[in-house]
């Protein structure tokens, strides 16, 4: 049975107007993907969430280098890349990163069989010879400890702990980057509980994110995993190498490719409109695979 690599390629600016009035579900038929609209969707959940399409978006996609690199790795490692291309609901109801935690429901609603799921950010490139990390999880929830942006992580843990988790906290060294998470069918109830937790605490979560500048679901998933005592497997840093610039290995010689397998292009200075991110993603992809045609 295949493993799934689940990614998001969503243009928020383009999508925001199209779903500002109502929420959407996405279905597939024999001719491809189409969209249906819900007008009376409650705030607490997204019913029957589905994937817009199972395709590699070519040409205009800003993350095409990431997606294609993962597709090439998937072919060699009994895996399939599935890209979530549309929001399930407006970002005012639920942030983009939170929505990917409907992955199990999406796969089941489209009758897609799988063993394990990797949720991975679309600002990553995977080395073509990367070992199969699915074989290292021991069927536990798995991720890579965060290295870098430690001040942000510490403040985020502190504020979410105080205002959202009733003082519950975690050892800082156990904190993972949510841009690389592996789980399986046994974690379906956990994912449901996590999303229900968001809907119950949404106002306070959003307040903490805006007040203290500690956005995304990264810290809440860390706290929730440990509060629920979910068995967890920490994988080595080389499977999600963050903060390449601050570590001094983001250079024209692509020095970082000698230190690990999965490269995340975050925390790069002067990165307006992700131009620096796209430059390094393209350069790394071309180094491994040659030019990618639009």
Image (cartoon, rainbow, N blue to C red):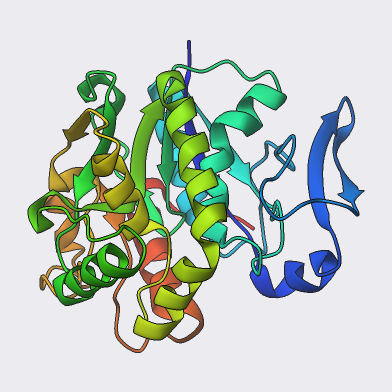
- Residue at screen point 13% across, 49% down: 174
- Residue at screen point 35% across, 74% down: 214
Query: Picture coordinates of residue 246 (x, y %)?
Result: 15, 75
Asked whether, in this view, residue 164 is left or right of residue 200, the answer is: left
Asked whether, in this view, residue 138 is left or right of residue 15, the answer is: left
Asked whether, in this view, residue 169 is left or right of residue 121, the answer is: left
Task: Tell me the quarter of the image containing the C terminus.
Answer: bottom right
- Residue at screen point 67% across, 40% down: 55
- Above/below status of 87 relative to 4: below
Residue placed most toward the observer, 13 or 127: 13
- Above/below status of 254 relative to 82: below
Let me know if residue 64 appears in the view.
Answer: no
In the displayed orientation, state which residue is furthest to the top: 1
- Residue at screen point 27% across, 24% down: 140
Q: How many marks?
A: 0
Query: Picture coordinates of residue 205 (x, y %)?
Result: 45, 67
Let me know if residue 266 appears in the view.
Answer: yes
Query: Picture coordinates of residue 17 (x, y %)?
Result: 81, 73
Residue placed most toward the observer, 166 or 127: 166
Asked whether, in this view, residue 55 is left or right of residue 286, the answer is: right
- Above/below status of 255 relative to 37: below
Residue placed most toward the observer, 279 or 108: 108
Query: Picture coordinates of residue 119 (x, y %)?
Result: 43, 42
Identify the image quadrant of residue 87. Answer: bottom right
């Amino acid at each position: 049975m295949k493993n799934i690599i689940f990614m998001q390629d969503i243009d928020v600016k383009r999508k925001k107007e199209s779903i500002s009035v109502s929420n959407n579900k996405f279905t597939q038929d024999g001719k491809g993907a189409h969209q249906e609209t819900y007008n009376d969707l409650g705030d607490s959940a997204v019913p029957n969430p589905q994937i817009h399409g199972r395709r590699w978006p070519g040409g205009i996609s800003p993350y095409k280098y990431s997606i294609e690199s993962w597709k090439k790795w998937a072919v060699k490692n009994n895996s399939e890349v599935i890209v979530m291309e549309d929001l399930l609901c407006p970002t005012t109801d639920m942030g983009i990163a939170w929505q990917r935690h409907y992955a199990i429901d999406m796969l089941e609603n489209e009758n897609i069989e799988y063993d394990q799921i990797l949720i991975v950010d679309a600002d990553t490139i995977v080395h073509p010879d990367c070992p199969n990390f699915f074989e290292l999880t021991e069927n536990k929830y798995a991720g890579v400890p965060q290295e870098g942006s430690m001040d942000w992580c510490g403040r985020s843990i502190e504020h979410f702990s105080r205002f959202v988790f009733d003082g519950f906290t975690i050892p800082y060294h156990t904190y993972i980057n949510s841009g690389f998470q592996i789980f399986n069918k046994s974690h379906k109830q956990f994912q449901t509980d996590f999303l229900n937790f968001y809907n119950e605490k949404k106002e306070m979560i959003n307040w903490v994110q805006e007040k203290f500048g500690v956005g995304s679901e990264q810290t809440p998933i860390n706290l929730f995993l440990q509060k629920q005592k979910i068995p967890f497997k920490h994988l080595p840093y080389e499977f999600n190498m963050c903060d390449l610039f601050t570590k001094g290995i983001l250079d024209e010689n692509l020095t970082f490719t000698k230190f690990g397998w999965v490269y995340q292009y975050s925390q790069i200075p002067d990165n307006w409109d992700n131009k620096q991110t796209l430059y390094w993603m393209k350069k790394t992809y071309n180094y491994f695979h040659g030019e990618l045609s639009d």
